[in-house]
Structure formats: structure tokens, C-alpha cells
Amino acid sequence: MKVNDTIRTELINKALEARKAAYTPYSGYAVGAALLTKAGKVYLGCNIENASFGATNCAERTAFFKAVSEGEREFTAIAIAGGKAGEETQEYAYPCGICRQVMQEFCEKEFKIFVVKTNGEFEEHTLMELLPHGFGGDNLT
Ligand code: THU
């Protein structure tokens, strides 16, 4: 599925919507993600924190794990929105290193990553830009 303006706007709005479900009693930092499959389906994710902090799951990985657990393996793009819970986003929330590594497992170099703000502003990156020289399955063959 090619990401035209309409689909990009839909992804941005869905990431902002997904952010509302974030469970963040410890950090107060809410993240939402909307992940687009190559077939055009969108999976949402939010961050889910835990009193045992290491058990926290990021929004991006929530979206990926929901999708992969339902049989999806091919992805085109993700939109990510993050900021102080209950407020409009003030800055771009780039995916953490672990989430970039999960993207590396399932996505091609050209996989698009949109970091977005509540006001509709966004930046567009590729996985290659955010995770150059990534370690992947090819290294193990
Ligand atoms: N978080 C995400 O959901 N995605 C990221 O890529 C970075 C961090 C979440 C995890 C935690 O709940 C909160 O943001 C603060 O680290």
C-alpha cells in the first residue's frame, strides 16, 4: 500500500487517537502508534506501563505485536505521537532503540516512520535513517 496524502493523514489521526488509551501512571508520557500493513490494514498501539517498570511495553511494539500475532508480516509505515499525557504533543517522539530493532525484524529499509504532533505537523523518516547498520536475520546466515 503506497502512502499517499490521504493514508498518511489517516495514520496520523489514528496514532493520536491510539494515544488516548495509553496506560501511563508512572511516567505520565503517553504514546500512540498506527501501523500500516502492505495490504492496507491499520493496527493501533499505545504504551502500557507496569509497576515493575521493565514490564512496560512501548506503543510501537504494542502495534507490531498485535499485528504479528494476527498473522501480519509485511508493513509499509507507522505513525507515532507522544507527549505528556492529557496534553497536546509539544515535540516529536522518535521510536526508542528496542522499537527500532523490532521494526528491523519485520520491515524493509524503506519502511516509513512518521513522527507526528497533535497539530498535524509531522516528520517523515525511513527505517534506514533511524537505524543504519542494524543487526538482522541476515547476520545470522
Ligand atoms: N515509550 C513508547 O511508548 N515508545 C517509545 O518509542 C519511547 C518510549 C513509552 C514507554 C514509557 O511508557 C514512556 O514512553 C516513557 O518512557
Image (cartoon, helix red, strand yellow):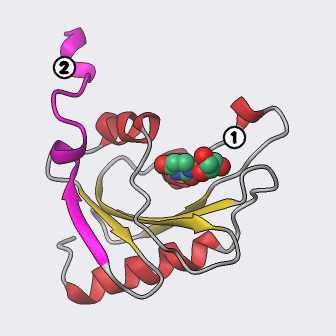
Residue 66 place in picture, x, y as percent: 57, 52
- Res 106 → quadrant: top left
Q: Earlier in the sequence, mark 1 or mark 2?
A: 1
Residue 111 place in picture, x, y as percent: 22, 54
Residue 130 place in picture, x, y as percent: 24, 44
The magenta stretch spans which residues?
Answer: 122-141
Camera sees residue 70: no
Viewer-closest of 37 and 119: 119
Q: Is residue 2 left or right of residue 28?
A: left
Residue located 35% across and 42% down the image: 103
Determine if the magenta segment contains residue 129.
Answer: yes
CB at mark 2 closer than 8 A to ligand 1?
Answer: no
CB at mark 1 closer than 8 A to ligand 1?
Answer: yes
Residue located 82% across and 55% down the image: 25
Q: Amino acid at mark 2?
A: Asp
Q: Residue furthest right?
A: 51
Dot 1: element: loop
Q: Residues within 10 Å of mark 2 (few under 14, many from 20)?
A: few
Residue bearing the label numbered 1: 56
Residue bearing the label numbered 2: 138
Report the disc number at residue 79.
none
